[in-house]
């Protein structure tokens, strides 16, 4: 059992792109923070190894051992319920790490960080998408509970933009986007890009999705710069996110609901502007866009404190959300 002065909690944000691990003492002081590789088993066959490696690196950086841990909370992409415990257990199974462990979906820790577990909705759009809210009664509601999925992740924007261009829907406003597209796929013209598209761009779907996801920032930037194709793509994505928010929001009693935007797509300047305009003018209730208070990995730490019965009213050194 760890001495109180050495006791630590481990917070883990396991997403589709990175694994983020933060180690804190019991008073809210950050001892270590590291970023590792993908934690989604649907996107990386080495996901569990990536998470364990990141935990080990963070412990070494903090100068602590697994025996010093008194609590661990991990939000892992793809985890939905106790039925997933069979595959999630190896993600945090390190020698000597026998402290109480709480495995959650990564949206749960995102909400805990962004809204400090208070009533409100988080809109996640980055590598993946998820809309999740906790209403005034403490009920957790997701757009997925309605079997709704917003095709607004990074890869979706990139696929749509490429298809719009290949379908001939571009105009003079899209010259910059098309140039970026050709440069990115190393094509000397649209005919060559057409050929790559017919061949599927990449034989491995996982790698292909990753490839398109990495192109998405160019799409959101092009939308900001006036590209007609990029704006249509982003506007469609924003509409899908709005519908998901309104579905989740239907479980709230109040006329005004706070909503925090999380992820590279949702927080890009063009999407922030579109989502703000759409949500704040919703006909049923007003959704007020607020800045996330903490990133998801801090949310995991706060939940670890709560599980231990410790105060969560601490100001852990914040990081960019």
Image (spheres, rainbow, N blue to C red):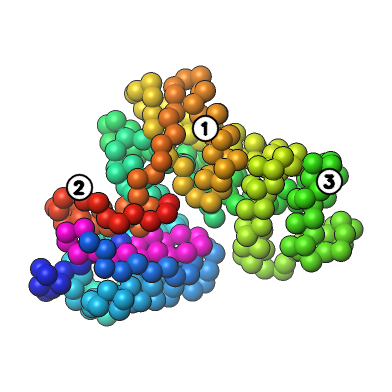
Position of residue 129 measured from the top left corner of the image (x, y, whole percent): 52, 48
Q: Which residue is mark 2?
A: 313
Q: Which mark is residue 167?
A: 3
Q: Which residue is mark 1?
A: 276
Q: Is residue 284 left or right of residue 92?
A: right
Q: Is 21 one of the magenta-colored residues?
A: yes
Q: Is residue 195 above or below residue 57?
A: above
Q: Is 202 one of the magenta-colored residues?
A: no
Q: Is residue 217 left or right of residue 126?
A: right
Q: Is residue 180 left or right of residue 29?
A: right
Measuring 80% from the left and 59% from the top, which residue is drawn there? 182
Residue 94 appears in view: no
Query: Which mark lies nearer to you, 3 or 1?
Result: 1
Q: Is residue 33 left or right of residue 239?
A: left
Question: Quick check: marks 3 and 1 in contact, CB under 8 Å?
Answer: no
Position of residue 262 measured from the top left corner of the image (x, y, whole percent): 46, 47
Disc 2 crowd, CA 10 A, few/some/many (<14, 14-19, 20+): few
Q: Is residue 65 above or below residue 114?
A: below
Q: Which mark is residue 87?
A: none
Towards the viewer: 37 or 45: 37
Measuring 26% from the left and 63% from the top, which residue is drawn there? 30
């Amino acid at each position: 059992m760890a001495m109180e002065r050495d006791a630590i909690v481990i917070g883990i944000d396991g997403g589709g792109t990175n694994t983020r691990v933060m180690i804190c003492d019991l008073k809210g002081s950050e001892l270590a923070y590291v970023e590792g590789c993908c934690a989604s088993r649907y996107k990386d066959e080495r996901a569990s190894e990536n998470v364990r490696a990141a935990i080990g690196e963070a412990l070494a950086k903090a100068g602590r051992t697994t025996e010093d841990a008194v609590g661990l909370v991990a939000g892992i992409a793809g985890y939905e319920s106790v039925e997933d415990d069979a595959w999630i257990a190896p993600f945090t199974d390190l020698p000597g790490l026998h402290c109480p462990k709480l495995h959650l979906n990564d949206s749960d820790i995102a909400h805990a960080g962004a809204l400090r577990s208070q009533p409100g909705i988080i809109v996640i759009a980055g590598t993946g998408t998820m809309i999740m809210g906790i209403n005034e009664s403490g009920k957790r509601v997701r757009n997925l509970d309605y079997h709704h999925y917003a095709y607004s992740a990074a890869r979706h924007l990139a696929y749509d933009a490429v298809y719009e261009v290949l379908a001939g829907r571009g105009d003079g406003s899209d010259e910059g986007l098309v140039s970026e597209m050709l440069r990115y796929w190393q094509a000397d013209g649209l005919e060559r890009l057409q050929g790559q598209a017919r061949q599927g761009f990449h034989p491995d779907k996982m790698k292909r999705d990753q490839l398109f996801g990495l192109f998405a920032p160019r799409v959101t930037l092009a939308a900001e710069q006036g590209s007609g194709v990029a704006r249509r793509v982003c506007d469609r994505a924003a509409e899908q996110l709005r519908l998901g928010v309104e579905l989740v929001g239907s479980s709230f009693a109040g006329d005004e609901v706070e909503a925090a935007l999380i992820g590279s797509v949702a927080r890009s300047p063009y999407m922030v502007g579109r989502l703000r305009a759409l949500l704040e003018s919703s006909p049923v209730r007003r959704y007020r866009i607020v800045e996330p208070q903490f990133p998801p990995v801090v949310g995991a730490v706060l939940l670890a404190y709560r599980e231990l019965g410790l105060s969560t009213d601490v100001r852990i050194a914040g990081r960019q959300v």
